[in-house]
Image (cartoon, helix red, strand yellow):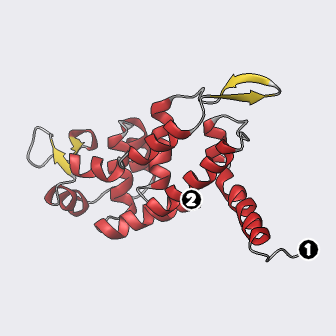
Amino acid sequence: MNEYLQELVALFLKYKLSANQFIFMYLKLIKKDEHLYRYLETARPLSRNEINDLEERGFITNINTGANDYWADGYIVTDRFKKIMEPDRSLAEEFWNTYPGFGLINNQRAPLKGVSKSEFLQRYAMYVRNNEVLHERIMRALRFQKGKEEITIRIDRWFEAHTWESVEQELEQIRKKVYGQDEI
């Protein structure tokens, strides 16, 4: 979760967005106008300058009927913002395709991909954010565990538990032993 927040902050800085502008566009993107209005009622509402800025930079389009109307539900998010928020899913697809479809859980054959593929791919893509170094770390751990037939949990649980981190520690211990750096 921490890395995801860091990525969001990086997006704010890269595209020179205020948190207010981002929240506005994100809630519009996921079509949660009821949350948007509640947010705008309880937080500092977007100023006309913030809205105009988003329009001028091509992040939103005003579909309000009057030229001076600034109703929140009268805006749509453009493809520019959608592309920022919808990272390439090819890395997620590679992970999905590599993960075994079935495995042994409690000595019984069970499906390991019993989750919504689309939702999982979205979560993976949002987390990895086209960071090929992170993706390759995850894939190396996955291939290692798959080769040893050690995968015994569903794909979402493996990913959410950051299993690759403990596998990396295991791989490091193996390297130390192979190269004579074992502490024993």
Residue at image location 11% in from the left, 49% down from the top: 68
Closest to the observer, 43 or 141: 141
| Count of number-bearing discs | 2
Q: Amino acid at mark 2?
A: Arg
Q: Residues within 10 Å of mark 1 (few under 14, many from 20)?
A: few
Residue annotated with mark 2: 137
Q: Residues within 10 Å of mark 2 (few under 14, many from 20)?
A: some
Q: Is residue 89 above or below residue 31?
A: below
Closest to the observer, 35 or 108: 108
Residue 94 in the image: x percent, y percent? 46, 43
Residue annotated with mark 1: 184
Residue at image location 38% in from the left, 45% down from the top: 90
Q: Quadrant of residue 63?
A: top left
Residue 160 in the image: x percent, y percent? 63, 46
Residue farthest toward the left in the current orientation of the protein = 67
Residue at image location 37% in from the left, 39% down from the top: 30
Whether residue 46 appears in this view of the structure is yes
Q: Is residue 70 above or below residue 180?
A: above
